[in-house]
Amino acid sequence: MTQSAVVKSSGLHSLRLGIAILVHPVDAFEELQKSRSLIAAFVLIVLTLCVRIVTIYMTSFHITSLQPENADLNLELIRFVLPLVSGVIACYLITSIMDGEAHFSQIFTAMSYAMLPYIVFSIPLAALSRILSRGELGMYHGISTIIWLWVALLIFLQLKVLNDYTFKKTVGVLLLVIFAFLVFWGTAGLVFALTNHVLQFVREVMVEVRYLMEN
């Protein structure tokens, strides 16, 4: 089989797996255990970022509080990538402690596939926002909530299937993952705030010293 044929076959398999994730997630995640593709995972992450950028510019101005002219695309990309990566790391660390069976690459790939509802439905929702009135904001936010609940459900299922957990243990492990995630970002935020205060103090001291030396 030629290299192009292998790539095509891998692409078709990833596409079929993506469709299965949306309609038969348990079977799809079981299949993902046997044949995982990091290339597909990176493609899905890139698609997630692209969808985020498109929705910023496509969503009607009276629906969203973030206007395109005020959007910092670099910040938006960071806001999507860092939580995903830190979530994967937290999930891997906790499942390693809790007798999990999933490898880091499996969790990374599964988490990427879990973003499929967002990838598939966010742009149509943004397009729908252009024909909705302010009185129909509830419909928009309701659909958006369903999309993110779907993503959360897929994250729960991949955690259960990949690690062969019971439902009860999956809930417990997921709570630990969320706790670890919050602790990580809380600590990171605290370190950032303290560092910022220290730098500001140093700058003020330097300004004061310079003023005293000049006078």
Image (tube, grey):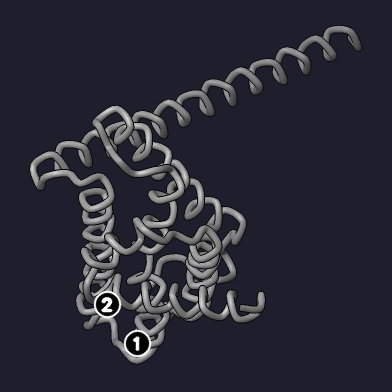
Disc 1 packing (10 Å; few <14; some 14–19; many ≥20)? some
Helix, strand or loop at mark 1: helix
- Image quarter where the N terminus lies is bottom right
Q: Position of residue 116 (x, y in %)?
A: 37, 70
- Whole-percent x, y for residue 38 in the image: 52, 58
| Residue lying furthest bottom | 131
Q: Is residue 215 above or below residue 81?
A: above
Residue 20 is situated, as x and y percent measured from the top left of the image, at: 29, 75
Quarter of the rendering containing residue 119? bottom left
Asked whether, in this view, residue 173 is left or right of residue 40, the answer is left
User: Which residue has dot 2 on it?
Assistant: 140
* Distance (Cα) linking label 1 and label 2: 8 Å
**Quadrant in the picture for the C terminus:** top right
Disc 1 residue type?
Leu
For badge 2, the amino acid type reads Tyr
Residue at 43% x, 47% y is: 83
- The residue depicted at 38 percent of the width and 64 percent of the height is 113
Q: Are marks 1 and 2 in contact (CB under 8 Å)?
A: yes
Res 182 label? none
In the image, residue 118 lies at what x, y percent? Answer: 36, 70
Crowd tier of the residue under label 2, counting other residues whose Cα lies within 10 Å: few below 14, some 14–19, many 20 or above? some
In the displayed structure, 157 sits above or below 89; it is below
Residue closest to the eye, 190 or 41: 41
Front residue of 2 and 100: 2
Q: Earlier in the sequence, mark 1 or mark 2?
A: 1
In the figure, is residue 77 to the left or right of 95? right
For the residue labelled by badge 2, is the local secondary structure a helix, a strand or a loop? Answer: helix
Pointer 1: what residue? 128
**Of 10 and 140, the residue lying toward us:** 10
